[in-house]
Amino acid sequence: MNRHGTNRHGTSIKRRQFLQWAATGLAAAASGNLVAAQSAPGPEGDKAGGPKITGIKTYKFNVATGQTVRDPITGEAVSSPFKTWLFLKVETDKGIHGWGEASIEWLSPVIESMLHEWTPLLAGRNALDVVAICDDITNRVPWKGGPIIGSAIAALNMALYDIAGKTWNVPVYQILGGRQRDRVKIYNGGINFESIDQARREAREALEAGARGLKGNPLESRTWAMDYHALEHSTKIVQAVREEVGPDIELMLDTHGSPSPALSIAFAHMVAPYRPLFLEEPTKVGSVEALKEVSERSPVPIATGEKLFAYGEFKEIIDARACAFLQPDVSHSFGLTNFIHISRLAQEAQMLMAPHNAGGPIHFAAMLQVDAVVPNFLIQEVSGHWLQRFDEFVDHDFQLKDGFIELNDRPGLGIEVKEDYVASLPYDESMAYRQYRNADGSWKGW
């Protein structure tokens, strides 16, 4: 296999019918059981039972982030100067192809290998059997969760939906039941927690660039588990930013799952007067009880979900009402199909969706498709830095206006990858691992 993978071919097998189309697919998702749905496909869908998969290609490459954040205590890096993105291309005998993304820190090389190992399970399949193909592969693997399998299935799921939309000449949101909104509310600005002056300046710059929602990472200056100085410093930053941007800009606070429940509860009470929209990942993943305790005692709504993958993990949190807002990452949690399942269950519990996004343009395009469909959507994350750069990698129609991305009717995911350019980008270095340490040298983060 070369750096970008290879294009592999297989023989035809028995044709299957596409399993999802329009409202039938969504109704099935609501019941937790997707059923076969046949509905007037376009001309390409009528010929020979739809496009058959002939092979896949993968593109793994590094993209500069433009920053390196260092721990104020140790001076060691807590963020990388680059990210590794992983794009998947699924090709068919009809000349129609689809794109997916499985970009994830440190694991992209492993996921790329897994996708190529699945080639024999894909060759010759009807690409319109989106759910059937993803379910078939998931069923064959005895390990049902986690970021590796979840991200690989997610990329495949996106790519197959992209093919289906292009085959029928409709956006993916039309296949998923139709859009329930005309534009998607986003937050794409940052909050700098280094100093009050820097926080005020960068907040102003973000608003001038069009941001209507800002998010930052408080409490990372702490030197031990109950560091009052970190609480006080982060609270003053939030207060200053709120004073700078006024009452109409949404503020989100992401603690990356690293504080203790006690520290998060104390912080929530201190920042509540400045009305953050939510406090994200206030506890480490693994204890629904700890998360629920924070949620019940916090005056600020709690959000979580970016480190969860399988449907059952989200169901446990929903059943316990352990947060207010759920944040699945569609590129890690088994794709669009699973996102619809999760959002329907959350809707029944009257919980809202605020999807996580730290990936590239294919991931963002896929998120817009499901954001358009689910009734209980709240807000979508996207990096302002990457939003401005997405056109380097894909042709797209992402239009930011007044804090919203306007939806369009381009077929499939609504983007086309600039394949020659992406193929030229290097993967010449692995991401450095973060170092979050307390003053005594013990681990403090993530």
Image (cartoon, helix red, strand yellow):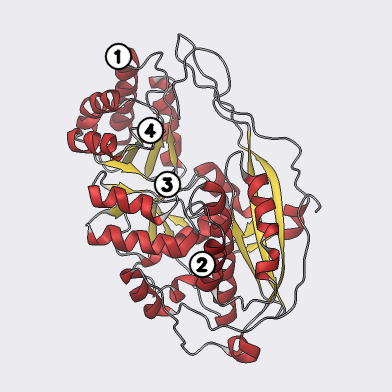
Q: Distance between the residues labelled 4 and 3?
A: 11 Å
Q: Which is in the foreground here, disc 2 or disc 4?
A: 2
The reply, left or right, for residue 261 in relation to residue 137 is left
What residue is shown at x 60% (from left), y 31% (from top)?
A: 80
Q: Earlier in the sequence, mark 4 or mark 1?
A: 1
Q: Which of marks 2 and 4 is nearer the N terminus?
A: 2
Whole-percent x, y for residue 316 in the image: 30, 50
Q: How far apart are marks 1 and 2 (CA)?
A: 49 Å
Q: Is residue 392 visible?
A: no
Specify the quadrant of the image occupied by residue 57: bottom right
SS state under label 1 = helix
What residue type is disc 4 on?
Lys
The reply, left or right, for residue 291 in relation to residue 39 is left
Quadrant of the drawing holding the N terminus? bottom right
The residue carrying mark 3 is 308
Q: How far apart are marks 3 and 1 (CA)?
A: 30 Å
The residue carrying mark 2 is 135
- Up the image or down, 136 lies above or below 1; here it is below
SS state under label 3 = loop
> Quick one: label 1, few (<14), some, or many (20+) residues within 10 Å?
some
Q: Which is in the foreground here, disc 1 or disc 2?
A: 2
Q: Earlier in the sequence, mark 1 or mark 2?
A: 2
Q: Which is in the foreground here, disc 3 or disc 1?
A: 3
What residue type is disc 1 on?
Tyr
